[in-house]
Amino acid sequence: MNNEDHYRQLYENLTQFTYLVATALFIFSLKWLSHPKTARRGVLAGVLAMVAAVGGTFLHEEIRHVVGQSGFFEALKWIGIAIIAATIVGIPLAMVPLTAVPQRTALSHSFGGLAAGLVGTAKYMLWLGEGPEALNKFRMTAIIVEIILGYLTFTGSLMACGKLQEWIPTRPITYKNQNLINLSLLTVAIAVGVIIILNPTLWWLFPVVVLFSLAFGVLLIIPIGGADMPTVISLLNSYAGLSAVAMGFVLENKLLITAGALDGSSGFILSVIMCKAMNRSFTNVLFGAFGQVQAAAAATEKKPYKSATAQDAAMLLEQAQLVVVVPGYGMAVAQAQHRVKELYDQLSKRGVDVKFAIHPVAGRMPGHMNVLLAEADIPYDKLTEMDAINPEMPRADVVLVLGANDVVNPAARHDKSSPIYGMPIIDADKAKTCLAIKRTMNPGFAGIENELYYADNTLMVFGDAKAVVGDIVKELAGQTGIH
Amino acid sequence: MQQLDLWSMVFVFMLATFIGFELIRNVSRLLHTPSMSLTNAISAIAVVGSIIIAGEQKTTATTILGCVAVFASMTNIISGFLLTDRMLKMFKKREPGK
């Protein structure tokens, strides 16, 4: 063995070793994330893993070759510029208000998809240049899977981001034969993909697959409403991971496969949890937009309800022993979480036990409510999951429904004609008194009438969530003279 | 050899998927948002492939594609880890005596 081969092997071993370390650190990173106590250590492990992965990659033979030829700075100039640009864009993206985290997450899924799509495209161009023998069926299959997944995740996530940011209407946009059109787009993309796999030199078909995948991503997300976003974001998370896996198969890189698979499976598990929490199937979330639109017209008859003022609400809350707050997306929209914390402080001071009941799909992404309440400094041991709080509900003196709607609708338990029938709910109706803060009696955009608001033990408090909670806090503070 | 490589990659994929299932199933529901932004940063491992394409500089076109991909995945890495840490810092237990 000559000297050059010796070094090549040394570098190759070094790269693989750093990849191995990175893989182990990624696994620890997710393991430590499981509990709030160790979670920040998990982030550190993730960062170290990424540093190891990037470092090991710069030892790649071809890159060393370029560096050897044109010098370190000249060779890595463009990568450096890309990294600087990424820092300039990435830091503000990390500083967004927590109510905007869902759209930031959707945007980053789209970046993930884009990177996979571009690398797949570049690799195809390179191998096409090397001649047909480089384009074997295995490589071609991997590339086609990578670009279909990558580009559909790119546009699909951009649409999700646009909907969450309300640049695009959040209601489901539907048209005739929607599912048929969507599925035929995907079928064409896959069919043309198969033709290229069999005839890799038909390069002009490649942009066709790209275009159809891009279009399919847009049309897939357009009919999905805001309330289904937690599932969709999780699913797109999974796609972004799987496109990294496909990239790993293209580049024959096991680190990409492992890390991508960790992300792919985590997105998948989260979307299964979300679907279960809504008692719906994947197909229903992705292709079921029609049912909701029809339901809107059904129930419009006027029924009597009771209303109360912030003053009444303050009195009820003050005399309670156990208060359960059910937050929903409305709390995020109104930015009411800090007022809720003040309410929590006022009530705790009086010895009232305040708990928060978090439905798994409350908000616009998994765990959205927990993050918002944690931001407002509410201790996390007060945030209770649906299954844990429901048995306690009959004991609760007051339930405060704050911007939540479908997740507290008792129709889900008994009304077979309701679109949300079968969905597990928080049993707000079983508490002694229920206070619901809402702007008007109008049903939300899903158009489902909520029985809870007409129940005998429910009092409606009309107004903006932030303003109403603020008023209640003022009432409570006024009585004790604390401001 | 090619065949063997393919199969070993499929094995790696399958095993990593199972590990991912187990790990995420154990994540407390409290932390679902941070866990999604962390796995998001992890899936930006695509940066490895992007650097290889951008770094080998075989053709101008592929170098440009590679650099855009480096930009996209690096943005996810930086914002993903920073945001996750920022969110996790907020999860506090009750201070004793309060």
Image (spheres, helix red, strand yellow):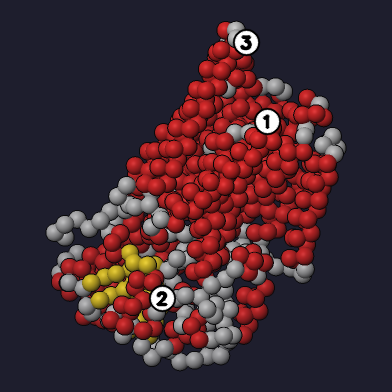
Label 3 vs 2, first from the N-terminus: 3
Tell me whether marks 2 and 1 sit on the same chain. no
Judge by depth and name the residue closer to the eye, A309 or A319.
Answer: A319
Amino acid type indicated by mark 2? Ile
Q: Position of residue B66 (x, y in %)?
A: 64, 30
State yes or no: discs 2 and 1 in contact (Cβ < 8 Å).
Answer: no
> In the visual, does A457 lie left or right of A58?
left
Q: Callout 1: residue from which chain?
A: B
As measured in the structure, the alpha-carbon distance from the residue carrying label 3 to the one carrying label 1 is 32 Å
At a point 73% along the width and 38% down the height, the residue shown is: A138
| Quadrant location of the N terminus of chain A in the rendered image | top right
Q: Quadrant of the C terminus of chain A?
A: bottom left
Query: What chain letter is assigned to the residue under label 3?
Result: A
Q: Are marks 3 and 1 in contact (CB under 8 Å)?
A: no
Residue A293, position as x, y percentages in the image: 64, 75
Q: Which label was assigned to residue A426? A: 2
State the SS at label 3. Answer: helix
In the image, what residue type sits under mark 1? Met
The nearer-to-camera label among 3 and 1 is 1
Same-subunit check for callouts 3 and 2: yes
User: CA–CA distance between discs 2 and 1?
Assistant: 57 Å
Q: Residue at x 39, y 83 (%)?
A: A429
Q: Which numbered tag is attached to residue B1? A: 1
Image quadrant where residue A330 sits: bottom left
Q: Residues within 10 Å of mark 1 (few under 14, many from 20)?
A: few
Q: Which residue bears the numbered disc 3?
A: A69
Q: Is residue A141 above or below residue A422?
A: above
Residue found 80% across the figure and 46% down from its top: A194
Q: Give the spatial CA distance, label 3 vs label 2.
A: 66 Å
Outermost residue, top direction?
A2
Percent from the top left, x then y, of residue A147?
70, 43
Q: Which chain's residue wears label 2? A: A
